[in-house]
Amino acid sequence: MPLAIIYSSTLRPDTVLIHAFQQSGDYDYSKELFQSNFSIWGWLWDHAVRFLSRIFRGVPHIGHVPLWVWVLLAVMVLILIVGVFVIRKRGLFYRNRQVEEEEADEDDNIYGVDFEAALAKALTKKNWRSVVRLRYLQTLKALADAGRIDWRPSKTPTQYTREVTAVSFRNMTRLFLRVRYGGFAADEAMASQMLGWQQQVIGEGGDA
């Protein structure tokens, strides 16, 4: 039944007319503001659950949850743990090629090494880490050849400072240990320091 046309004064609100408008469904605009509860992710999840349920039909349940759900959650957690481990321990899987090349030639042996050629190569590449290491090993060889230390592969650098007590040699040993084993990045200034200390230890008899 259509709503009867009611004329009213615009200067004074007609409560009866307002009530009539409120009761009429033709003026109920709020229903157009309702949002749908549809979710694409929910829809995909429901279809995935149904698909997996058909595949794993007959699989035992743990409580009210199918066993395959627990297996899926366990796999997801495992993938997450592996991902975090890989991110934190990238060095175990992604080795730096330059470091590999350096480590391949890092046997701290003082004999059978062409120090001049190795130093020239390291200086050309500005590989200051290798320069620091080679300067120290070259100094050990000079000291061993001069009979000032008893070099042995099993001895530690600190042990040689008891045989050569010069401050310059102690400084060389300290810097070598920091760069070689302490993980400190070497630079050109350190390489220059090693050369200066080396000249003092060898050229001045180690008394500097």
Image (cartoon, grey):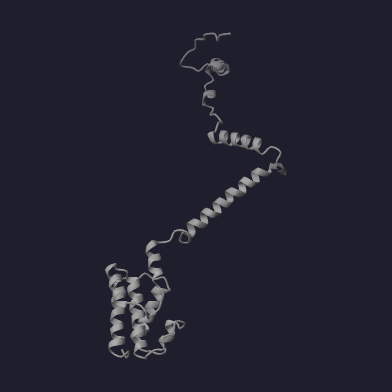
Report whether 58 appears left or right of 16: right
Q: Where is residue 39 drawn, in percent x and y?
A: 54, 33
Quarter-wise, where is residue 28 in the image?
Answer: top right
Say if 114 sits above or below 48 in the image. below
Against 195, residue 21 (above or below) is above
Query: In the image, 206: left or right of 27?
Result: left
Could you tell me which quadrant the C terminus lies in? bottom left
**Residue 53 on image: x %, y %:** 65, 37
Quadrant assignment for the N terminus: top right
Up-down relation of residue 114 to residue 26 (above or below) = below
In the image, farthest residue toward the front: 112
Q: Is residue 70 rendered to the left or right of residue 168?
A: right
Foreground residue, 170 or 96?
96
Res 151 quadrant in image: bottom left
Q: Position of residue 188 (x, y in %)?
A: 29, 71
Q: Quadrant of residue 172?
A: bottom left
Numbered marks: total: 0
- Residue at the image position 33 percent from the left and 85 percent from the top: 142
Could you tell whether 31 is left or right of 166 in the image? right
The spot of residue 116 in percent (x, y) is 29, 77
At x 32%, y 69%, the residue is: 127
